[in-house]
Image: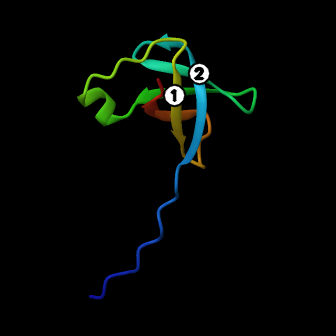
Amino acid sequence: MPKQPQKPKEEPIELKGTVTEEVRGAFLVKVDDMDHTVQCTLAGKMRRYKIRVVPGDRVRVEVTPYDLNHGRISFRER
C-alpha cells in the first residue's frame, strides 16, 4: 500500500507581549500590537530548564492560526 503524501504543517504565529497575571499554571499575556490577551502555558524546554516567568516579564508567544486565544510561551526576554 503506497504512503499518502503528508499535508504541510501550519506554522505558528509569533507574537510579543507582556505577562499580566498567572492563573493556575497558565499565564495571561497582553499582546503588544493589538488589544488582545492570550492564555499561555510554558513550552517544554522552559519547564525543563526551570526558567521562571513572573508578571511584568516580556515574552515571545507562539499561537496557532486555528485558535488565537491559547498559546505557548517560547522565550522570556531579559
Q: Is residue 53 left or right of residue 45?
A: right
Residue found at the far left of this picture: 48
Helix, strand or loop at label 1? It is strand
| Residue 69 point in image, percent of width and height | 60, 33
Please tell me which residue is depicted at 49% across the width and 28% down the height of the picture: 40
Snapshot quadrant of residue 52: top left
Q: What amino acid type is highlighted by mark number 2?
A: Thr
Location of mark 2 (residue)? 18
Residue at the limit of the structure toward the front, as seen here: 78
User: Residue drawn at (30%, 88%), measured in percent from left and top?
Assistant: 2
Q: Quadrant of residue 76?
A: top left
Camera-side residue of 3 and 60: 60
Q: Quarter of the image for the N terminus: give it.
A: bottom left
Question: In front here: 3 or 64?
Answer: 64
Residue 35 x/y as whole percent: 75, 26
Q: Are marks 2 and 1 in contact (CB under 8 Å)?
A: yes
Q: How many other residues sit within 10 Å of disc 1, few (<14), some (14-19) or many (≥20)?
A: many
Residue depicted at x 51% and y 18%: 57
Whole-percent x and y of residue 11? Answer: 52, 56
Q: Quadrant of residue 75?
A: top left
Would you place residue 49 above or below residue 28 in this image? below
Give the left or right position of residue 44, taking residue 59 as reference.
left
**Residue 4: image location, x then y, percent:** 37, 81
* Crowding near the residue tagged with mark 2, few <14, some 14–19, many ≥20 C-alpha atoms within 10 Å: many
| Residue 24 vertical placement versus 58 (above, below) | above
Say which mark, if any, is on residue 59: 1
Count all numbered tags in the image, as a single digit: 2
Q: Secondary structure at mark 2?
A: strand
